Image (spheres, coloured by chain):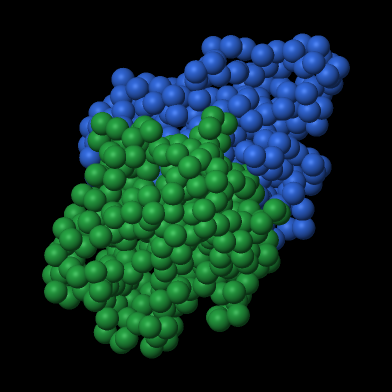
Chain colours: A green, B blue
Amino acid sequence: MYIHSVSHYLPTEVVGNEHFTQLNGLSNEWIIERTGIEKRRKAASGENTNTMAVEVTRRLQDKTDLSTVDLIVGATYTPYDTIVSLAHEVQHHLGIADIPVVSVSTACSSLLNAIEVAEGYFALNKATRALVIVSEHNTAYNNEQDKVSGHLWGDGAAALLITKERQSEGDLAIKGLLTGGAAHTPKATTGVMMKPMDGGVTMPHGRDVFINACQYMPKATQQILDRCGMTLADVDYVLPHQANLRISRNVMNTLGLPESKLISNIERLGNTGCAGCAIALSEQWDTFQKGQRIVITVFGGGYSYGAMLVEV
Amino acid sequence: MYIHSVSHYLPTEVVGNEHFTQLNGLSNEWIIERTGIEKRRKAASGENTNTMAVEVTRRLQDKTDLSTVDLIVGATYTPYDTIVSLAHEVQHHLGIADIPVVSVSTACSSLLNAIEVAEGYFALNKATRALVIVSEHNTAYNNEQDKVSGHLWGDGAAALLITKERQSEGDLAIKGLLTGGAAHTPKATTGVMMKPMDGGVTMPHGRDVFINACQYMPKATQQILDRCGMTLADVDYVLPHQANLRISRNVMNTLGLPESKLISNIERLGNTGCAGCAIALSEQWDTFQKGQRIVITVFGGGYSYGAMLVEV
């Protein structure tokens, strides 16, 4: 399984920390110290999860032929429409008839859940070229006034063409992929929630989310390396879920890897949910060197987690 | 792949057609003539997609051991929480650690999408015992006043234990399964929608939904039979998505099958979304005879469709 191409989209409006200082008194310094976030993007009126999904698809079409896509997997926890899901909106845009189309909703980890769903279709010989789209419209459901988590979220989207067979020299080979639910832990189902009819995004137990994110991402990273017969010495970059720069640094510290191997965009984009890692992959794509290995590891509410090892 | 066991749950409150006569003037006769629906269930205050998912899981636990479940796939388009998805809520209830947990949102067709996702995990050897849960809380997002579609919807849930290998003589063997998106059709993305932040469930193009449902379900039924080397003569029952009794009858008519082979619960339950077929399967489970074959065929907004052939 290979990542042949990736694109991303960020809304144009930039929201700096001073916006929250005015709203609820949180200072720029306090937000940066606690989260690393300096600014984030906000979708314009009329933009939503589905429009951003179509936009990243257009951008991927500029790079690669999508006319033979035979599976579309969408992912979001901030849906514009749960019936006409982002995957369906993209099928409509592409005009490709009668291929499997499914959207998943597995919090911030669902980039890897979506790729694992595609991996399953490949194993079944029901698909060979999957378009995976991650899109989050956090600001639609976020309460900016909320001092606990209102300042964390940003909007954005990314699209990846995942293929069963290698398409070109530049493809990223997916060497291993695992996902897991960690909802068995005591506060998993109340740590961070997104109830469309009851308050939107809330984070009553941010500390528990923080602790579990710091534990699960290094553990999943180690697991996927073990499965691939590799060690941390084989890893050039770690791309963790972009939730909080302190979590990312904690993950690197636990793994014993230097911060120079950390890929991060949270400073500029905030927590863009399940889109964060894919946006970062798109942003960094041209900088990767042949032979380099990157672990993408995710953690999300629910809880949910995963890790994927890719090789350039 | 086998269906080992199935359970269902229906809220206790029954809403008859007279409720809509009072609300918006639609008569009992008019609703029955147009939809076949006589009554539907409504979740109580405090009930939601996640509580119903846990309840059907409890009921399945009364029938079969779920302690070795190694995959949970949830499905809904009426989510209570998109981060703590119904699949995560169920993992929390079961207390099973570190198994893949994912929820899908693919409208009324997502029972089959969810089973196909499980089929993929089986093919990857990443799971062998999947708990699939379908749960819909339509009344949370429905506008009862809406004369077009307000009277169509009901609440309910079902759970299925799907296993890679046969567990017992009574298992239903899944002989073939296909799903597809039909979002390429002109009105697919505006026919029926569920926008949590913008009006909930609406159906601006009910006629287009009706026509496509009547076309896609027979077509998918024929396709799955072809793939399994069978014909309509081999089919004992057809269980279509429970959207409208006129659609179900139209499907049987197109297939040239008598109404005695139709499984239907829409008269009593209304459109329970992606839960409808699974509820019917649970209701009818004990009536099936060894050797009988049932085609479950679904159609949903987006559009999306699928068919599955099972053999007792």
Measured as percent of width and height from the top left, residue A209 is found at 31, 42
Measured as percent of width and height from the top left, residue B204 is found at 79, 42
Q: Quadrant of the C terminus of chain B?
A: top left
Viewer-closest of A214 and B1: A214
Residue A202 in which image quadrant: top left
Q: Is residue A15 above or below residue B198?
A: below
Regarding residue A278, the answer to whether it shows in the image is no
Residue shown at the point (33%, 54%) measured from the top left: A33
Residue shown at the point (29%, 55%) measured from the top left: A246
Measured as percent of width and height from the top left, residue B284 is found at 50, 24
Viewer-closest of A161 and A208: A208
Viewer-closest of B174 and B114: B114
Measured as percent of width and height from the top left, residue A68 is found at 57, 74
Residue shown at the point (50%, 47%) measured from the top left: A21
Q: Is residue B131 above or below residue A131?
A: above
Relative to residue A96, is residue A78 drawn left or right?
left
Regarding residue B48, the answer to whether it shows in the image is yes
Residue B266 in which image quadrant: top right
Relative to residue B221, is residue A149 drawn left or right?
left
Circle count: 0
Viewer-closest of A180 and B180: A180
Residue shown at the point (51%, 65%) measured from the top left: A158
